[in-house]
Image: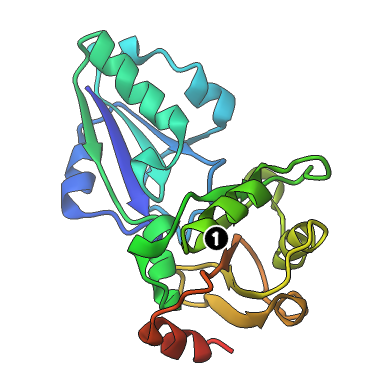
């Protein structure tokens, strides 16, 4: 059987997961979509994108295999493809979901159901317009926009808040933003305000994300956001 297991934001594994891992002959940890908060006190093999994308799920016919995914299982299309491969080949697969950045940003005070499509800002973004187009589309429906900033944990490389905001400003953005670092960890940082001021804040280490709130905020959203100024 193939086990697709979300470790959650803080990587606290449940007793159920620990019992499952005891039954697995191979345990892999994908190490490219996010950063592990804390340490997993189990023997795992860290794998990169190429390994996961080319993985032959038929291996799970003969033995129990676990793939640990930081955050939630279906936070990346690669994991959906693995699940689909198992279904098509009649291979047993079990999914254990967990928390992810998509829900953890609720700590900002912004209502989760008011978020529109999520955008990702890559390192090489000079000629990339999709993230800004997503922002424009979300604004038309009074939705918040979450920008996930690129990262390469294996090289300890992160697109930071300043770089993300400057990407938006070069395309004409002016307004309020929420800058977030290490959401879900004990030392998270959240700052809210005008983009030109937030980009000057010290957020410390990554990973990072930015939220462009809707112009139509509920009074409770406004009240919580003020606490992050």
Question: Which quadrant would residue 89 be assigned to in this image?
Answer: top left
Please name the residue shown 33% across and 15% down the image: 85
In the rendered view, tell whether residue 229 sits above or below residue 24: below
Query: Does residue 71 lie above or below 179 as drawn?
Result: above
Q: Quadrant of the C terminus?
A: bottom right
What is the total number of numbered labels drawn onto the structure image? Answer: 1
Residue 79 in the image: x percent, y percent? 40, 31
Seen in the image, is 64 located left or right of residue 41? left
Q: Nearer the viewer, residue 52 or 131?
A: 131
Task: Locate residue 162, reporting x and y percent.
Answer: 76, 67
Q: Which residue is mark 1?
A: 139
Tell me how the rendering is colored.
rainbow
**Residue at coordinates 41% horizontally, 81% vertically from top-left?**
221
Q: Position of residue 216 (x, y in %)?
A: 47, 74
Dot 1, how many residues are within 10 Å of its Cα: few (below 14), some (14-19), or many (20+)?
A: some
71, 105: nearer the viewer: 105
How far from the left and from the top, in percent, is residue 55? 45, 17
Residue positioned most to the front? 140
**In which quadrant will I find the N terminus?**
top left
- Helix, strand or loop at label 1? It is helix
10 or 173, nearer to the observer: 173
Q: Nearer the viewer, residue 14 or 42?
A: 14
Q: Is residue 214 left or right of residue 160?
A: left
**Can residue 136 be seen at all in this image of the molecule?**
yes
Residue drawn at (55%, 78%) of the image: 190
* Whether residue 151 is visible: no
Picture layout, residue 221 above or below residue 160? below
């Amino acid at each position: 059987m193939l086990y697709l297991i979300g470790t959650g934001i803080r990587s606290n594994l449940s007793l159920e997961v620990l019992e499952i891992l005891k039954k697995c002959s191979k345990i892999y940890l994908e190490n490219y979509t996010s950063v592990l908060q804390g340490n997993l006190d189990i023997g795992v093999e860290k794998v990169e994108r190429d390994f996961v994308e080319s993985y032959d799920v038929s291996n799970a016919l003969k033995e129990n295999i676990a793939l640990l995914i930081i955050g939630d299982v279906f936070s990346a299309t690669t994991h959906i493809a693995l699940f689909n491969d198992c279904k098509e080949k009649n291979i047993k697969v079990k999914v254990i979901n967990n928390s992810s950045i998509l829900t953890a940003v609720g700590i900002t005070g912004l209502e989760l159901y008011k978020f529109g499509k999520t955008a990702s800002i890559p390192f090489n973004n000079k000629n990339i317009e999709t993230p800004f187009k997503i922002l424009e589309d979300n604004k038309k429906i009074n939705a918040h926009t979450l920008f996930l900033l690129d990262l390469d944990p294996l090289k300890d490389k992160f697109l930071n808040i300043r770089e993300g905001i400057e990407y938006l400003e070069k395309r004409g953005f002016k307004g309020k933003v929420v800058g977030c670092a290490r959401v879900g960890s004990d030392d998270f940082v959240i700052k809210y305000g005008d983009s030109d001021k937030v980009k000057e804040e010290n957020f410390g280490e990554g990973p990072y994300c930015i939220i462009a709130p809707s112009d139509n905020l509920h009074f409770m959203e406004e009240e919580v956001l003020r606490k992050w100024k």
